[in-house]
Image (cartoon, coloured by chain):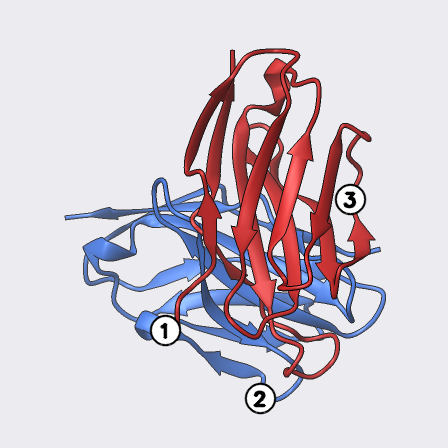
Chain colours: A red, B blue
């Protein structure tokens, strides 16, 4: 079974631009979560989607948004990029077949975003 | 609210010697606990998880962890370190269906 895929793997943007990152979950997984990883802040939760609905949201400004499609693929968008948005953005999917509340998240390789 | 404390930011061990990576957690109710590993420029890979079954959990690559409720700890161990174990390790807590909370990570260095 193919793992979580993320595109693109690397991205360079300039301040003020916007960016869209894509995540395809493991086949059959309906939950997708997004995380930001930086050296200073570590791994921080952005948001989680389940069946096209946002289920949890982290403490990020409104410039960060996401959505999930009917095929469970997800996108996250960052508008008006700032230098501090440079990070590794990780996507994870989990299966609803596991018991409620203990779903294991499987991570993709990430998209490394550099903002100049 | 939940939190995770990884007690060592960096651990160095010689190849063939035991590994101990320490993790303490706090949670308002019984959580699920995970250990993930991240190799350079890679995503996170699940090593093992605790979900209120056996308190000693065995994972991949010879790693295991013991859940101790009285000590609120979930330390990761391996009897004999291998060079390929060099990576960053994250302890993670998830109470119920809430969001994952990650520790700050422990960088494991293996000395040849």
Residue where numbered disc 1 is placed: B60
Q: Chain under label 2?
A: B
Q: Which residue is located at x 67 percent, y 72 percent?
A: B32
Q: CA distance from mark 2 to mark 3?
A: 31 Å
Foreground residue among A70 and A66: A70
Q: Which residue is located at x 64 percent, y 22 percent?
A: A18
Q: Position of residue A64 (x, y in %)?
A: 73, 33
Residue where numbered disc 3 is placed: A58
Q: Position of residue B79 (x, y in %)?
A: 30, 71
Position of B81 with respect to B94 (left or right) is left
* Residue A78 visible to an observer of this rendering: yes
Q: CA distance from mark 1 to mark 2?
A: 16 Å
Foreground residue among A6 and B101: A6
Residue where numbered disc 2 is placed: B54
Q: Is residue A94 above or below residue B2?
A: below
Q: Quadrant of residue B83?
A: bottom left
Same chain, labels 3 and 1: no
Q: Nearer the viewer, mark 1 or mark 2?
A: 1
């Amino acid at each position: 079974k193919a793992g979580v895929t993320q595109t693109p793997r690397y991205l360079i943007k300039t301040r003020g631009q916007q960016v869209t990152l894509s995540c395809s979950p493991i086949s059959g997984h309906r939950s997708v979560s997004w995380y930001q990883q930086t050296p200073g802040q570590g791994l921080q939760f952005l948001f989680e989607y389940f069946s096209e609905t946002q289920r949890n949201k982290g403490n990020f400004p409104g410039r960060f948004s996401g959505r999930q499609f009917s095929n469970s693929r997800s996108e996250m968008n960052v508008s008006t990029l700032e230098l501090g948005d440079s990070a590794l953005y990780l996507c994870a999917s989990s299966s609803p077949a596991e018991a409620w509340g203990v779903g294991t998240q499987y991570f993709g390789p990430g998209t490394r975003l550099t903002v100049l | 609210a939940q939190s995770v404390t990884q007690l060592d930011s960096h651990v160095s061990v010689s190849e063939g010697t035991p590994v101990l990576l320490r993790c303490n957690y706090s949670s308002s109710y019984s959580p699920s606990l995970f250990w993930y590993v991240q190799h350079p420029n890679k995503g996170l890979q699940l090593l093992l998880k605790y979900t209120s079954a056996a308190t000693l959990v065995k994972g991949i690559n010879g790693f295991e962890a013991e859940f101790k409720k009285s000590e609120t700890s979930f330390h990761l161990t391996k009897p004999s370190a291998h060079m390929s174990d060099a990576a960053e390790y994250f302890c993670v807590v998830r109470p119920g269906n809430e969001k994952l909370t990650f520790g700050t990570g422990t960088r494991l260095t293996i000395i040849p």
